[in-house]
Image (cartoon, helix red, strand yellow):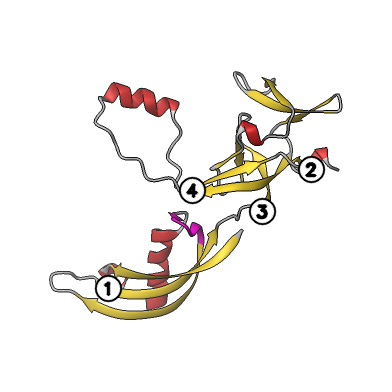
Amino acid sequence: MFFLSEIEHTLRLPPYLLNRPLNEAIKGELDSLFLDKVIEKLGLCVSVYDIRSIDGGFIFPGDGASTYTVRFRLVMFRPFVGEVISARLKESSKDVSLGFFDDIYVPVPLLASPNHSEPDPEHKNGIRWVWEYEGENYPIDGTDEIRFRVHNVSYPPVPLEQGKDSDEKESEQKDSKPFAPMVVTGSLDADGLGPISWWV
């Protein structure tokens, strides 16, 4: 689930940071650039682990900042296909949350089957999914931790803005979710998956 990834990056260090120790100033800049950001094929950056090397320190003509080439390691959240993860249900339809990462979805075909949906008494206009097993109904709700198996991890391309008028854009923004640079698709359709209370 968590990996160390080594990266090389050319970093511009603003002049107001030159009075701080170099390692500390560079780590602060790396934190602001990479922390909580998704890097395609690497995952979500959780923290800057360490700095391996710092080269350069050149000041280009007309620029008061010094430029360094930095090699460093990042702690990345990148689940692998087949991994089983525990999380809490964020939204009764299909979203799951890890607390620090919310873009996990369990599509209806990957829920435990047979199943059905019913109105959620806890949330107005909400639904909850119910697994039907040997004449018993087992609801999937937000009161329990849920185990799911990672089915797929994808990095959708950044959407390009279309030339639409502002009324259309506003109505679309209300209906659509914000862009997610990394999406994890999960599955609950196997023994031991779903709310933990089902299996203890």
Q: Quadrant of residue 121?
A: top right
Q: Which sits earlier in the primary sequence, circle 3 or circle 2?
A: 3
Q: Which mark is residue 191?
A: 2
Q: Which sits earlier in the primary sequence, circle 2 or circle 1?
A: 1
**SS type, badge 1:** strand
Q: Is residue 93 above or below residue 58?
A: above
Q: Residues within 10 Å of mark 2 (few under 14, many from 20)?
A: few
Q: Quadrant of residue 178?
A: top left
Residue drawn at point x = 32 percent, y = 27 percent: 169
| Mark 2 or 1, closer to the camera | 2
Under mark 1, the amino acid is: Thr
Mark 4 sits on what residue? 182
- Residue 20 seen in the current view: no
| Mark 4 or 3, closer to the camera | 3
Q: Which sits earlier in the primary sequence, circle 4 or circle 2?
A: 4
Give the magenta-colored segment's residue range.
38-46
The quadrant of the picture occupied by the N terminus is bottom right
Mark 1 sits on what residue? 67
Alpha-carbon span between mark 2 and mark 1: 54 Å
Residue 19 at x, y percent in the picture: 32, 75
| Mark 4 or 1, closer to the camera | 4
